[in-house]
Amino acid sequence: MNNIKNNSLVHTPLKNEMGLDSPIEAISRIDKKQLSALHRLGIRTFRDLLYFFPVKYAGASTTASISSATTGEHVILYGKISKLKTKKSFRGKIPMAEATFTDTQGSMKLVWFNQAYIARLIQNDSLVKIQGKITERNGARTMQNPLIESVSAIPELNTGSLFSQVNQSGETTDIPRGNFVPIYRESQGITSRWIYHAILKMFKMDFFQNLEDSIPNDILRKYNLPSLQSALIWIHTPEKESHAEIARKRFAFEEIFMIQLDRQREKMKLRDAVSYPITTAEEKVQEFVDRFEFDLTESQLGAINDIFTDIQKNIPMSRLLEGDVGSGKTAVAATATFATVSTKPKGQMNGALQVAYMAPTEILAKQHFESFIQYFRHMPVSIALITGKGCRKFPSKVNPGGWTNISRTQLLKWVANGDIAVVIGTHALIQKSVKFKNLTCVIIDEQHRFGVEQRKKLVKKHEQVPHLLSMTATPIPRTLALTLYGDLDLSILDTMPSGRKPIITDIVTPHNRKSAYEHIQKQINEGRQAYVICPRIDLPDEESNPSAILTVATKAVITEAKRLKKEVFPEFNIGIIHSKMKPDDKEKIMSEFASRKIDILVSTSVIEVGVNVPNATTILIEGAERFGLAQLHQLRGRVIRGNHQAYCFLATDSEGETAIKRLSALKNTRSGFDLAELDLKERGAGSLGNGKQWGITDVGMEALKNLKMVEAARKEAFNIITHDPELKSHPLLEMALRPRKEIHFE
Ligand code: ADP
Ligand code: MG
């Protein structure tokens, strides 16, 4: 789905003519190192470069000096670095680097947390350029985790602009039209300035003069949005701030509009598709849920009703079930499964309609398998588990009441001939070799859009399109849901099962850390278990590739586990789990934790959010201020499952009032979706995490603060698709939506 980004540009060049799809190396002589830097930045074509928007604009003052910058301002400063050294934070927990930075006006301290390697990258007493936010600590100015790079000389700043310097070849370089200097993300070998000049060059090329705008004119006029060309010029070379703003607005609209068009078109296609209607009688479904050991909540009943209504039709269901961790999605999934497998396939006396239930991880797939056995053990329904590691089947002749291991070949055979009705698994489930006889319903747990793409894969192999139930506990705001899931109907579980004790949430500062540890000690002595989550790792842009983050995060987990064992809990068993571990090792640790061989599990924040260990009642989250509220909420969901009182400790070193106040919201708010809205309102789209995980760019994410804009984009897309489902009279849009060949050699 990444291919619907940056798509307003659809000019196709003639042979040998430079155009949007020309490779970036066509713009000027580029050496290998530069080219790979451009690729790292995601710039491969002219189009990519034009859509590589500034991360911000610096006016003259913001590149001046320590004394002229105001607290809270993002600035670029040039100066000398000294007293560079590494150390541990005062509790010996976080490795850090610090240094003194001096410019013509004064000096201040720089600190890098979790980035001790900075000290190795930069030479003491060298000239550097730093970039970051000025903050104040104990009355003195400082910068935390600034981006830093060595420079050979300090540029003249009195002329007011970085760009008014003389360049290497002796000519004066272009001065931006206004006072706003665009600042682009950089990578080793490519500077912000290089990008700026490449874009100016592109503006002068023929193809740029002839760009066609794929957004219809009447839509632009209706919402007062600038044309494509103006918007590109304004975003890269604004004369005033308002120009940049309105240009960004246009691109934000464009991105959301394109996503909406794509989703609406998918939805339209499904309207013509055929699925297998489920004819199981309502009374039978009622009987099934009456057997549960609990009463369904209002919202569970509502969701089951929505689903039941959908699957009786012969057009495929496309429904998203949104509900916090612990809201009881599995029971809803089991009921949908029951309804499906209780309908006989047409013209068949034996066999059943089949359900595929896909989970994101092996651990979760196993848990679903176990709980489905409980839900269906009174019925003659066969259930199988398929993961990369092996296959299981229930019921079993050799193990009455339980499951047995079977070979993959055997499983594939029974799935293909329809003997196995319910197949639960990881993505091993959608491999080519897995063929279903009567696949009628696909249930996907926690896969976001991914799930919808995967359904398409499943669909191709079968004549009928299966019903889709996609489930998520990832709390996202309404605007994001509307955008991502524009093609899905929504059911929401917004009431928690009754009788569940709300989790007690508390904030841990350096002052009361000891009592938090005492609490954990007491809990474990009472037979409970605990999680400790290490902080989210932020590396400077250039370092922030997934593998660098993983490495640093892994180190943090190992170090923290050692420290806890040595200094805090020598009497307890402490285990670690992180994404760099092999699946087998993860599995082993999780089962040791589940069987209480491990008292405290130290992990990164990315591990298996839905894992169910009811005896784990406390979670301590380090560096809590670095997470979005919704993410914190999701993490604390790990301890919400048992009957014991659960506790969540949010540890922060920041004693700033805003951080504490923000974290306090978690004490009183129980809905992850409310917290996501709150984060969006207060901290902007950045707090929702990286838009890339949803296939949305930074600019697109900006639209999410604006419900009106998202609704407008949705409405316009809907209008177009309703009247012109194949976009025959909108060839530019049609072309923009076409998957572009993505060439990635890395
Ligand atoms: P999730 O939405 O996170 O997938 P689960 O389906 O795993 O939640 O349910 C969490 C726990 O709550 C399970 O142990 C389940 O049996 C229980 N549960 C589900 N629905 C109800 C209910 N209506 N009342 C009481 N307990 C429930
Ligand atoms: Mg679940």
Image: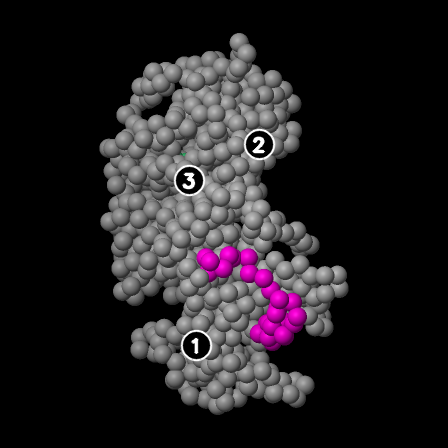
Which residue lies most toward the right here?
Answer: 16
Q: Would residue 93 be seen by someone viewing this image from the given angle?
A: no
Residue 339 vs residue 642, the one in the foreground: 339
Q: Residue under circle 2?
A: 459
Decide: is 172 above or below 4: below
Q: Would residue 720 be seen by someone viewing this image from the given angle?
A: yes
Name which of mark 1 and mark 3 comes first in the sequence: 1
Relative placement, left or right, of 506 versus 745 is: left
Q: Secondary structure at mark 1?
A: loop
Residue 411: quadrant of the picture? top right
Q: Position of residue 121 (x, y in %)?
A: 57, 71
Name which of mark 2 and mark 1 comes first in the sequence: 1
Residue 382 vs residue 304, the one in the foreground: 304
Instruction: Name the chief secondary structure element in magenta.
Output: helix
For label 1, count other residues whose C-alpha is less than 10 Å away and answer few (under 14), some (14-19) or many (20+).
few
Q: Residue at x 38, y 60 (%)?
A: 684
* Proximity of marks 3 and 2: CB atoms separated by less than 8 Å: no
Verify whether residue 166 appears in magenta. Answer: no
Distance from mark 3 CB to nearest ligand 2 atom below 8 Å: no
Q: Position of residue 667 (x, y in %)?
A: 26, 50
Q: Amino acid at mark 3?
A: Thr
* Proximity of marks 2 and 1: CB atoms separated by less than 8 Å: no
Q: Residue at x 56, y 36 (%)?
A: 456
Relative placement, left or right, of 277 versus 204 is: left
Q: Amino acid at mark 1?
A: Lys
Disc 2 versus disc 1: distance between alpha carbons?
51 Å
Q: Residue at x 62, y 85 (%)?
A: 167
Q: Residue under circle 3?
A: 472
For label 2, count other residues whose C-alpha is less than 10 Å away and answer few (under 14), some (14-19) or many (20+).
few
Start-end of magenta stretch: 194-220
Q: Position of residue 515 (x, y in %)?
A: 27, 52
Q: Residue at x 56, y 63 (%)?
A: 51
